[in-house]
Each structure stands twice: as C-alpha cells, then as structure tokens.
Amino acid sequence: MPPLQTSPSFGRSLFVLGGARSGKSRHAQAVAEAAAASLAGPLVYIATAQAFDDELRDRVARHRTDRDARWQTVEAPTQLAAALREVDGANTVVLVDCLTLWLSNLLLADLDIDQEVDVLLATLACAQARVILVSNEVGLGIVPDNALARRFRDAAGLLHQRLAAQVDSVDGLMAGLVQSWKRPV
C-alpha cells in the first residue's frame, strides 16, 4: 500500500478520525515520524488496547512491527492522561492509538468517563509535546440496540466534539484518503 501524504504543520496537536480500516493509524504514524524528524526528538506510542483475544493480540503485534526502533511504547489502557504527562517534553512526538479503545476500557472498568475526558483535555492543553490522537468514528451507523452500546457511541461522539474543538488540527480519513478538516490559523 502506498504511504499516505503527510499533513502540513499540524501545530501542537492533531486529531485523526475515521472509520475502521480507513488508514488512520498509518496516516498518524507517518505524520508523527515526519514531525519527529524535524524536531530531532523521541517518538512515543501510547497504546490503549487490551488484547483479550487472539485476533486483537495479532492486530497489536502487527501494529508493533509497523513501528521501528525509534519508537518507545507505553501501555495505558485507562490512565491516558498520566501516561501523557510522563512522556511529555518539548521535542517529543506522542501518538495515542486509539481513543475509542480507551473509552471502552473506561466503560468496562466503570470509571467516570466525563471526569477522565476532562483530565485528558486539561493535560493536552498543558502538553509541550506534539500529540497526535487517533479515534474511530462510530456515530455514522445505525442507532445501537442496547443501552451500553448507545452509552459508548454517545461518549465517543461527545469526546470527539470536545477534542476537535480543542486541538490545533483535525484530519478525517475514509478509504485511505485524508481530508484536513481543521488547521492552525
């Protein structure tokens, strides 16, 4: 598959949003690597996945092999803001993949999603690092038929709205094609 075109300067923060298998992670990684090359700083991948089955374990393994030795990986299934604070630095580029898995983990752990989102957004506002956040768009399909799925969909939609309003840049992906929805002014 050809590499995606990397975005022009995204400022301090970029939100990458798209459907499943749309090319989000590949695009975010390419943008992160380009930014790190210009900053000559470290690359940090914050992974939110918890591999509970063989399929997800295989997917996580594939993602790891896509990243070379320049990358440091930090696992943060629920404590995302704390992980961001730990790796924050002026020349650091951080890639968080993905926010919908993080939300799922918060739901499964019965944590206060609103509070966790507030803490994440406050942490991002103070971050010195360049931060790229990846998430799945889940609100374009049918209305889920159960309360838990509707709660998840609503939480993701609200997180995406708040995040898009706060970050410097937003890229949307569909079928491997990138559209810049927001850039720094």
Image: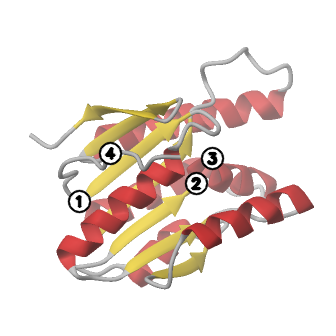
Indicate the quadrant where residue 133 lies. bottom left
Earlier residue among tags 4 and 3: 4
Can you identify the residue that label 4 sits on?
5
For mark 3, does the 10 Å Cα neighbourhood hold few (<14), some (14 to 19), or many (20 or more) residues? many
Q: Secondary structure at mark 3?
A: helix
Of residue 18 and residue 153, the one placed in the foreground of this image is 18
Q: Amino acid at mark 1?
A: Arg
Mark pair 1, 3: CA separation: 21 Å
Can you identify the residue that label 1 sits on?
12
Q: Marks 2 and 3: in contact by CB < 8 Å?
A: yes
For mark 4, does the 10 Å Cα neighbourhood hold few (<14), some (14 to 19), or many (20 or more) residues? few
Question: Of all residues shown, which one is farthest toward the front?
Answer: 2
Q: Marks 2 and 4: in contact by CB < 8 Å?
A: no
Q: Secondary structure at mark 2?
A: loop
Earlier residue among tags 1 and 4: 4
Mark pair 1, 4: CA separation: 19 Å
Can you identify the residue that label 2 sits on?
98
The residue at the point 72 percent across, 14 percent down is 142
Can you identify the residue that label 3 sits on?
100
Task: State the image coordinates of residue 126 (x, y, percent, origin top left).
Answer: 27, 67
Q: With respect to residue 131, does 146 lie above or below?
A: above
Quarter of the picture containing the C terminus is top left
Q: Secondary structure at mark 4?
A: loop
Q: Secondary structure at mark 1?
A: loop
Task: State the image coordinates of residue 115 (x, y, percent, origin top left).
Answer: 54, 54
Earlier residue among tags 4 and 2: 4
For the image, the number of numbered tags is 4
Q: Marks 3 and 4: in contact by CB < 8 Å?
A: no
Task: State the image coordinates of residue 151 (x, y, percent, origin top left).
Answer: 71, 33
Earlier residue among tags 1 and 2: 1
Earlier residue among tags 1 and 3: 1
